[in-house]
Image: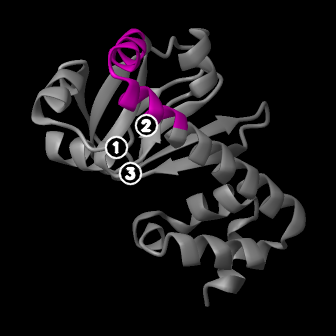
Amino acid sequence: MSIELRRHFEKITPLTDQEFDYILSHFTTKKLKKHQFLIQEGDSVSNDYFVVKGLLKAYHVDSAGKEYIMQFAMEDWWISDYEAYLSQTKATLNADCIEDVELLCLSLYNRNKICADLHKIEHFFRLNSNAGYVALQRRILSMLRSNAEERYKQLFSQYPTLFQRVPKTLIASYLGVSRETLSRFTL
C-alpha cells in the first residue's frame, strides 16, 4: 500500500526514504467490503482517506430518499466529508463502497502534524486541495452550462474506466439525470 501513496505524493514533491517513512507512520489502514459504509451522515469524521484499491461514492440523500452523488473515488484519489473532517463536525454526506476497498487513513491531527513538520507535505496538500476546488468548480459549471448528454460525454472522456466499474444508475445519479435518460446516450 505504501508504494501507491509514495507515488501519489511524488507526483507533486520528491521525498527521501526517511521523509516518506515518517509520513507513512501517521497513516493507518482500513479495508472494507462492497456496500459497507465508510462514512454515514451524522457520524463524526476523523479521517481523510486515500484510496489504494477499490471504488467508493460520496453522496447525499434528500428527505424524499433521492440520492445525489457528489464524488466517486477510485485508486489514487482521496475521499471524506471534508466539511466534517476539517471542522470536526458531524457528517452531512455518506460514503460507501462500490467495490471492496483498501484505504490509508489520515487523521486531522496527524495531517496537521506532518504538514507542520514537513513543508513539502503542506505544499502537497495545498496543491491537491486547489486541484479539488478547480474540479468542483468545473463540475458545478458543467451542471449549469451543459445538457445531460454533454455532461455524459465529458465524464466519459475524463474517466472512461469509471463506466466499466460503476452501474449506470450511479452514473445517472452523478450526472443528475434519470437512468432512462442516461440509457439514450449509451445505446
On the image, the x and y values in percent for residue 186 come to 61, 85
Residue assigned mark 2: 124
Specify the label residue 24 is tagged with: none
Q: Amino acid at mark 3?
A: Leu
| Mark found first going from the N terminus, 2 or 3 | 3
> Residue reaching furthest bottom?
187
Mark 1 or mark 3: which is in front? 1
Q: Nearer the viewer, residue 34 or 46?
A: 46
| Mark found first going from the N terminus, 1 or 3 | 1
Using the numbered discs, state the Cα–Cα distance from disc 2 to disc 3 in whole angstroms. 23 Å
Q: Secondary structure at mark 1?
A: loop
Q: Badge 2: few (under 14), some or many (20 or more) residues near its Cα, within 10 Å?
A: some
Residue assigned mark 1: 13
Q: Residue at x 39, y 18 (%)?
A: 111
Q: To which quarter of the image does residue 29 belong?
A: top left
Image vertical order of residue 16 relative to residue 90, above or below: below
On the image, the x and y values in percent for residue 99 come to 33, 51
Left or right: residue 17 versus residue 13 is: left
Image vertical order of residue 40 relative to residue 136, above or below: above
Residue assigned mark 3: 55
On the image, the x and y values in percent for residue 168 come to 56, 68
Specify start and end residues of the magenta stretch as a single range.
109-126
Using the numbered discs, state the Cα–Cα distance from disc 2 to disc 1 in whole angstroms. 7 Å
Mark 2 or mark 3: which is in front? 2
